[in-house]
Image (cartoon, rainbow, N blue to C red):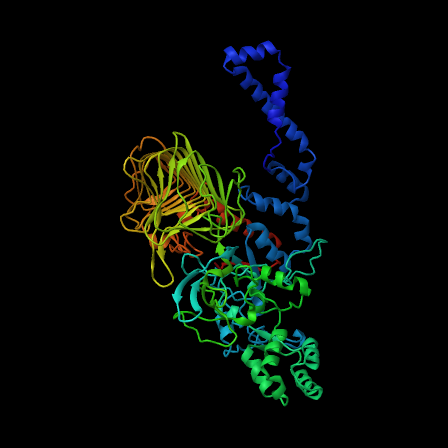
Amino acid sequence: MPIARDDYREYYTEKLWQWLPAIYRELDDTEGGGVLRAFVRSIGAQAAFLKRNQDRVWDDGFVELASDWAVPYIADLVATRLVSALDVRARRVDVAKTIYYRRRKGTLLVLEQLISDMTGWDGKVVEEFRRLARAHHGLDGLPRLGRLTHTPEGGFADLRSVRGALLTGDAFDEFHYTPDARRPQGLTGRRGIPKLSFHEFRMHSVRMRGVVPRRVQDFLGSRDGFTFDPSGRDVALFSTDRSHPSGARKADATGDWSSWHTAEEWQLPRTITCRLLGEAIFEIGDAQIGWILSTPLIATQPQRDAAAADLRKLAVERMVGRRVVLRLLAAMPAAASLTLPGVQAELLLRALVTDCGSAALLPSGPEIVPWQSPTLAEETSYRDAALAVRFVGGPPVPRSETRSAHLDAWAPPVLAGIRSVIEPERGRLVFDHNPTGLLAVRVDYHVGMFAPIGAGAFAREVDDPPATVLWANGGVGAGTPANGVAEVQDSVNYVAPPSQLAVVSTTVRARESERPYVILDGANWRFAAAAANGQLRLNGLWVGARQPRVVRLEGNFERVRLRYMTLDPGGLDAVGGVLPPVALVVAGFVEKMVIDRSILSSIRLDGTGVIERIVIRDSIVHARDAGTVAIDAPTASMRMARTTVIAPAIDALALRAERVDITDSLIAGVAHVTNTQEGCFRFSARGAGSRVPHPYESQVVNDMSRLFASLRFGDYRYALLGPVAPPAIVRGAENTGEMGAFSGAIAPIRQDSLRTKVDEYMPFGRIANVIIEN
């Protein structure tokens, strides 16, 4: 457990200091050089340690509050098999829930919770015997039908359902198969009676709020083509486990697990497909029939009674798709009443079930949400929606005015009453922004993120002092302070941020859970120190450009720190336009540069620029353009931990420095270090032909295509190790995890923790098969 800021050391140091005779205190100040004071401070630190230990005697008896060293002792009391000590979170959860697991051993409830508890990821467990084709037995009872295809258990597939066919092989597959006798390994050999498939979704959904979409297609009229991503890239939109307020999957405050159910398709952090977003399932019930009997949209009561009688024929039938409902209504005897435009629209609105894609992912807008009171309906629907399009200060576009489509040509058909057409796989949008105007359009959506690296709307520590200048609604207020903190309040675009050429102690940071997009338009973003000890801190910003621009440091800086920053590595937008990289250029002197959990395109010197020391942790430095060196600091002394450095090619120069000390890192390129007599290159990988000091337990890589799942910035798999990456890289870090920027996520160790607990709590005679979905 972390040590609280209790000020015990300062308190005991001052108390002991005051007990000393004043003559000794005065002599220490005038002649002793503070040696006695330092000795008393060390005694005070030990007194603080003992005091904390006494304070925690009671806490260490409870696993929720205990120190890490005490957890194994509590584990002995319940006789649990501990997972790796490197997986601190899983070990604590395992001990805390041991009794709970044992009482429910072998149930799907526990097996799905093990994925979340041991790995921190979401998942779904599938009993593969339920997907085997077989003859129906009389003792089976009524067969359960597929939600989309209505395929009975063990029955023949309805191949007419395109949506069902696309789910083949997925965790939500509704078709059935012949047994496979092979031992399961991922997608191979998973069909069989004793086999359980654990589908892991390793991404985390991060919500972006109030983002300004970029217009990439200018059509005639008020309809235009946008990308949800403010830079203009194609990005996959993700669903979230908060997509539906009635979809409780965890215990409530009383510990009642009766509300738990296995995940639905829209309740997992995965890419939203076009067909899932457009999925509309309808059911006629008492509420819809009662509305027909009282609506003034139908002229006379006899006509209402006839329409209600027709609707009763469709009661309890689940109808997939609007066309099916409209076709059935048109075939009814009372079709003249049921097909009135106002009646049709309202009936579709009221008959939409809550457990379908469009209802779960899109906001209901101003309509009444059936599971909420009218006063909370709009707010709840908007908050729980996975994505929404709206105007500044206005409600979101409701699901009744939204459709999904593939926007390859950016020209969907114009449909009456439809304002927004979305392709979620690539984050594209065609939207009618009349009458509010183009500049007022805002979007909310979720993206997938494996670990908090770079700018993102996730929670992060903000230790800097309170803000002195606020940037909000695209305006920079009083500008960038020379001695103070500028805080960006939202996630909109900020064009041409003001430079600061008299830096004393300057901080520019994003508000927690916000991700502003800073666009360098017309000039570089320059920071120059006013004196010989300038301090600069940048935190949580995404810096991009439409033309080649850089973040430029001039003058004499004592310390420059970048945390959770993204300096755009460049690439292509959704229509093939070039997005240039934004480099970090040092034209002055920087005594120490610290880069923490950031994504950069390159670090280089200009003219007489010098960097004395560089510290890089948990970061990605990606040089895309040929001839660009990712880190080019020939005179710098560098410490690098858990970092991925990517060159334009595996045989291109990626890093140049005077002295390095590198651990748990992956250099996909050539590294040239001048001083090979000092420092160390340990538990890391580099390209062939590199010159590094004292390599220890290190690897040489010679194939870029095998290393990464994706090198396109904006892809949720960006810089992740691919499925065919060499095992020596996947398990080559000092903690037996992967090398590179995601080493701290300890993904392989989490996998080991899950396998250990699954073997312990799985039903007897079953075989576990882990499938990594994303």
Q: Is residue 191 visible?
A: yes
Q: Position of residue 503 (x, y in %)?
A: 41, 35
Q: Position of residue 62 (x, y in %)?
A: 68, 40
> Does residue 249 appear left or right of residue 487 in this picture?
right
Q: Position of residue 164 (x, y in %)?
A: 52, 73
Q: In percent of the image, x 33 and y 45: which residue is there?
A: 630
Q: Residue furthest right?
A: 254
Q: In percent of the image, x 66 and y 42: which residue is there?
A: 63
Residue sitting nearer the eye, 681 or 41: 41
Above/below status of 552 relative to 172: above
Which quadrant would residue 318 be assigned to in this image? Answer: bottom right
Above/below status of 312 relative to 349: below
Q: Position of residue 727 (x, y in %)?
A: 41, 50
Q: Is residue 195 visible?
A: no
Q: Quadrant of the N terminus?
A: top right
Above/below status of 459 relative to 3: below
Residue sitting nearer the eye, 62 or 605: 605
Q: In percent of the image, x 62 and y 84: which residue is there?
A: 338
